Image (spheres, coloured by chain):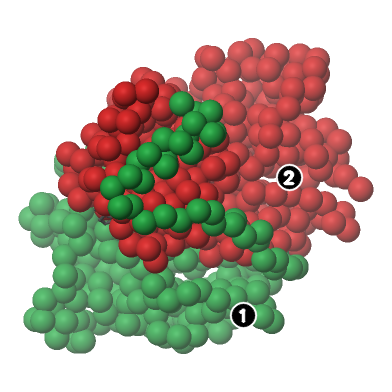
Chain colours: A red, B green
Amino acid sequence: MSLNTIMVFAEGDESGPTTLTLELIRAARGVAANVEAFVLDDGSSMAESLGDHGVSKIHAMGGAEGKLVGAHAAALMADLVVSNLPDAVFFGQTPDGRDTAARLSVRLDQPVITNNVGVTVEDGVLVLEEPVFGGTQNIFTAFRNDGASLALFRPKSFEAESIGGAIAEVSVLEGADPGNSGTAIVTGRVIEERSGPQLDSAAVVVSGGRGLGQPEAYELVDELAGLLNAASGASRAIVDAGWVPYSKQVGQTGKVVKPSLYFACGISGATQHLVGMKGSKVIIAINKDPEAPIFSVADLGIVGDVHKVMPALIETLKAT
Amino acid sequence: MKVVVCVKQIPDPALPGELDPTTNLLKRDGKLILDESDSYGVEMALQLVEAAGGGEVSLVSMAPNNEMSGLRTALAMGADDAILVSDENLAGTDALGTAKVLAAAIGRLSPDLILAGVESSDGYTGTVPEMIAGVLDLPSVTFAKQISIDGDTVKAQRQTEAGYDDIECKLPVLLSVTAGVVEPRYPSFKGIMAAKKKPVEALDLQALGIESNTVGVVGARQETIRVTEAEERESGEIIEDDGDAHQRIAEFLGELKVV
Ligand SMILES: Cc1cc2nc3c(=O)[nH]c(=O)nc-3n(C[C@H](O)[C@H](O)[C@H](O)COP(=O)(O)OP(=O)(O)OC[C@H]3O[C@@H](n4cnc5c(N)ncnc54)[C@H](O)[C@@H]3O)c2cc1C
C-alpha cells in the first residue's frame, strides 16, 4: 500500500536540481502515488527536469533574496502543508535542508527523523532506515504522528531515475513572512575550489588523513589524485587542523562519496569517516598500523608508511 | 553581553555505543561527559565575552538523573553558571522535544546570544539548534565557522557545501558552531576547583511549565520497530610494505582499469 502525496524540498541552481534532489524524488515515488516539490525560485528552471523525474506539481517559493533559506522557506511551506495535507515532506541532508526541516518541524509541531538511507511503507505508515554505529547496524523507525511526517535523507541513498514525465505544473506560493526569525542576511558568498573532479561525483577519490604528518604532505594526495583523475578528500582530523578546507571532508559531517575507487592514505577509519565512504566499490588503504580499522573495509590494504609508498606509487604511475 | 551555550552530556564516544534492547534507545545510564562538539561553543562564548570586554556565559543542558559531570567540565573552562533540566518523563525525547525544553530554559535567561554545537556526537540530528531558534522565534546562523560581534550585530561565516557565506544579523540570535573553529581550552586546576562552587540550577518539566506528554517517548511520536545488523564489508588482501607495495597497487589499479 502506498501513500498519497509526498512533497520534496528541491535544491539546485540555474543549471537545474541537485542530484540529491532527484534522489529524493526517486525515494518519494517508491512510497507515494503523487510527488510534488518545493522550489526556491519561480519554478520555471526546474519544471522540466523535476517533471521528467516524476514530480507532478511545483510549489514555487521565490528566491530567499539575500536571506537564509530555512526560516523563509519553512514559513511558506507550513501554510501549504496545513492546507494540502501531504503525508510527508522529504529533505536532503544539506545545511539548508536541515535548517528548513527544523523550522518546519517547529511551525507544524511535527517530528523530524534524520540521517535516513531508506524508506518503506508498512501498515500504512512511513518507516525510515538509519545506519548507526558507523553503519554496523540499521535502525528502522516508524512515524506515530498525525499529520505530515518530516524526513531528512543522506546523499547517495537512492538512484535518481528519469521516467519521462510531463513538465511539472507550477503554482506560486505567496503570503507567509518569516518575521523576526528571517532577519539574518547573506552579505557575501565564497566558493572554495570548484575546479577539477568534484568529490561527490568523481569516479575516483584520493583522501588523506592525519597520518600524512604535516600539511605540506597533502601534496602527495593532490599529486596522486591528479594522476588518477580523481577528486581529493580528507578526514575531519586534518580539516579541523586547518590543512584543507571543509569542502574536502568525507564522512558523517562531511560529504558522502560512493566512487568506483576510494584511496585512504593515513586515515584510521573511524566510524564517522567510514559512513561517508563505505559504499565505495573498491577501497585501497595505506596505513602503518596493521590494526587500523580502515583495513576491515579495504579490498587492498598496505601496511606501510605513506611517505614511502605514496611517492613510489606516484613515480611508478608517472612512468607508465 | 549575556551568552547562553547549549551543552550536551553524552556517553564517552571512545566506548562502544549500545542500544537498550527493550526501548532501542541509546543507552545513557553510565557516566556522561561533555560532548566535544559543544566544547567549541563554550570556548567561542568565552572568547566573545572577553572580546566584548565582559559579560556572562551561562550553560543550559538537559540530561537524565541530574547528571552534571559534563557541565562541570564546561564550568571549569570558565562558564559562570548553568541550568540543568532533568525529569524522568524526558527519556526518549526527540530533537523537537529537546528544543522545546532547552528553549524554555533559555527563555528564562533573556540572552543576547545563544550558541550550540552543529550536531551532537551521539545523536547527530543537526536540527536541535535551528529548532530552538524556531521555538524562540529568533533568527539563526547554523554551521558558523567564524563569529564576531560588532555593536548589536553578529557577523559570521556560515559553512556551505561549496565554501561559505558571510552572514550578518542583529542580536539576539542563535548560532550553531562547527567543530574546529576555536581551540577549546583545557580546564586549569583553579578552574576545576572553582567549578565545584559555581551555581547549577536544577529544574524539572513542571518548573519549566512543559506538559510531559509533549516530550519524552510520547511527544516524540515515533517508534523504533526493529534493528538489523548491516551487511559487513569483506576485507580483502592486506600486505606489509617491504619496499615494493607501490607495485602491487599499480598492478591492482591496472586490474581495475583505473590506469
Ligand atoms: C560527531 C562527530 C562527527 C565526525 N565526523 C567526521 C567526518 O565527517 N569525517 C571524518 O573523517 N571524521 C569525522 N569525525 C572524526 C573521527 O572520529 C576521527 O577523529 C577522524 O576521522 C580521524 O581522522 P584521521 O583518520 O585522519 O586521524 P587519526 O584517527 O589520528 O588516524 C591517523 C592514522 O594515520 C596512521 N598513520 C600515522 N602515521 C602514518 C604514516 N607515516 N603512514 C601511514 N599511516 C600513518 C595512523 O596509524 C592512524 O591510523 C567525527 C567525529 C565526531 C565525534
Identify the subunit bearing mark 1.
B
Which of the two discs, 2 and 1, sits closer to the camera? 1
Residue pictured at 22% horizontal, 65% vertical: B57
Q: Ligand 1 quadrant?
A: bottom left
In percent of width and height, residue A36 lies at 74, 30
Residues at marks 2 and 1, CA–CA distance in whole angstroms: 29 Å
Residue placed furthest toward the right: A1
Q: From the image, tell me which residue sits under label 2.
A: A88
Label 2: how many Cα within 10 Å (few below 14, some 14–19, many 20+): many
As helix, strand or loop, the secondary structure at mark 1 comes to loop
Looking at this view, is B27 or A5 the one in front? Answer: B27
Residue at x 45% of width, y 85% of height: B30
Residue type indicated by callout 2: Ala
Find residue B149 and report its horizontal and vertical position in percent: 19, 44
Q: Is residue A55 left or right of residue B67?
A: right
Element marked by disc 2: strand
A139 lies left or right of B152:
right
Q: Is residue B193 left or right of residue A176?
A: left
Q: In the figure, B156 relative to A271: above or below?
A: above
The residue closer to the viewer here, A33 or B85, is A33
* Residue B70 in the image, given as x and y percentages of width and height: 32, 77
Give the residue at mark 1. Answer: B20
Residue at 58% x, 18% y is A16
Answer whether labels 2 and 1 touch (C-beta < 8 Å). Answer: no
Q: Which x, y percent locates residue A300?
A: 48, 49
Q: How many callouts does the rendering have?
A: 2
A93 versus A223 height, above or below: below
